[in-house]
Image (spheres, grey):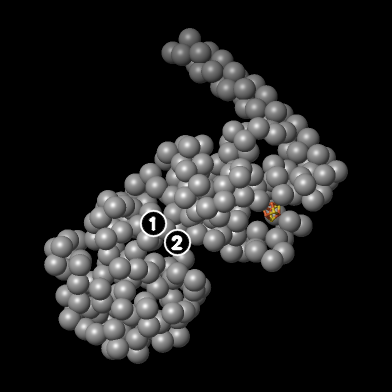
Amino acid sequence: MLKQERYRHFVDYFSKNQPNAVTELHYGSPFQLLIAVILSAQCTDKRINQVTPALFERFPTPESLAASTPEEVFTYIRSVSYPNNKAKHLVGMAKILVDVFHNEVPSDIDQLQKMPGVGRKTANVIASVVYDAPAIAVDTHVFRVANRIGLTTNARTPLAVEKQLVEYLPKETLAIAHHWLILHGRYICIARSPKCDICPLTWFCKYYARTNTETYLLKAEAALAKKTKDQKKKKALDKISKELAKRSEGNL
Ligand code: SF4
């Protein structure tokens, strides 16, 4: 199967089945999302959602966070991974947000990366989720799932994965494709043992093709036959409705 075809099937499936996929992090403003994403590095969204309500309440604005200390922030985030570093990053980020960006979370990926704790992945999340920019953040789930499905080839770094996804995915799907890949990786295509037995993507997944060749071929054939049949059916229905429209115009 050609890479372009895999992309087409991937976009078709998720557009139809998860058209409204969003981040599972809880937030109420770009500032809060920035905090949540910085905290979420190497930690679960579930854990972050447990600590952010109290944190957001104590630090409702960039100024309040900038005026605090890493020691105080630490007390709110002690249960997340790397709390010491993240506390320093949050206070440093807030200071730059106040001093350089006048309390506005910037939309530009390079500008975003000027803040402590904000790498390319976090910057891409903010740009795509907050500003709907055609950017895609590559985290561990996106990296793994894109490689397994075969959306990427020989991509050994997150940047290489990002470049291939940006090259092949339709621009308007880039932001949502990030959530499709993350959610699929979190619940089905999990790292240690992917749940291929319940996965709806088996018929175009490269990993599945490699590990279950015979079943893959049967599934791919059946799915393609169904698609062709559906397309033919749609064409016939379009033709009939056009014909009916013509007739009813003639009767007016
Ligand atoms: S078929 Fe298996 S490896 Fe492929 S995407 Fe689904 S769960 Fe992942």
Mark 2 residue type: Thr
Secondary structure category for the residue under label 1 = helix
Is residue 8 shown to the viewer in this render? yes
Say left or right for 94 vs 2.
left
Residue toward you, 102 or 9: 102
Residue under label 2: 23
Residue 146 vertical placement versus 73 (above, below): above
Say left or right for 21 vs 53.
right
- The residue mark sitting in front, 1 or 2, is 1
Is residue 176 shown to the viewer in this render? no
Q: Quadrant of residue 78?
A: bottom left
Say left or right for 147 vs 85.
right
Dividing the image into 4 quarters, which one contains the N terminus?
Answer: top right
Label 1 to label 2: alpha-carbon separation: 17 Å
Residue at 75% in and 49% down: 208
Residue under label 1: 120
Mark 1 residue type: Arg
Dividing the image into 4 quarters, which one contains the C terminus?
Answer: top left
Residue toward you, 145 or 200: 145
Relative image position of residue 73 (x, y in whole percent): 30, 84
Residue at 28% in and 88% down: 72
Question: N-terminal of the two: label 1 or label 2?
Answer: 2
Secondary structure category for the residue under label 2 = loop
Residue 97 vertical placement versus 133 (above, below): below
Residue toward you, 98 or 36: 98
Residue at 22% in and 78% down: 65
Residue 41 vertical placement versus 134 (above, below): below
Relative image position of residue 22 (x, y in whole percent): 45, 58
Q: Are marks 1 and 2 in contact (CB under 8 Å)?
A: no
Residue at 61% in and 54% down: 145
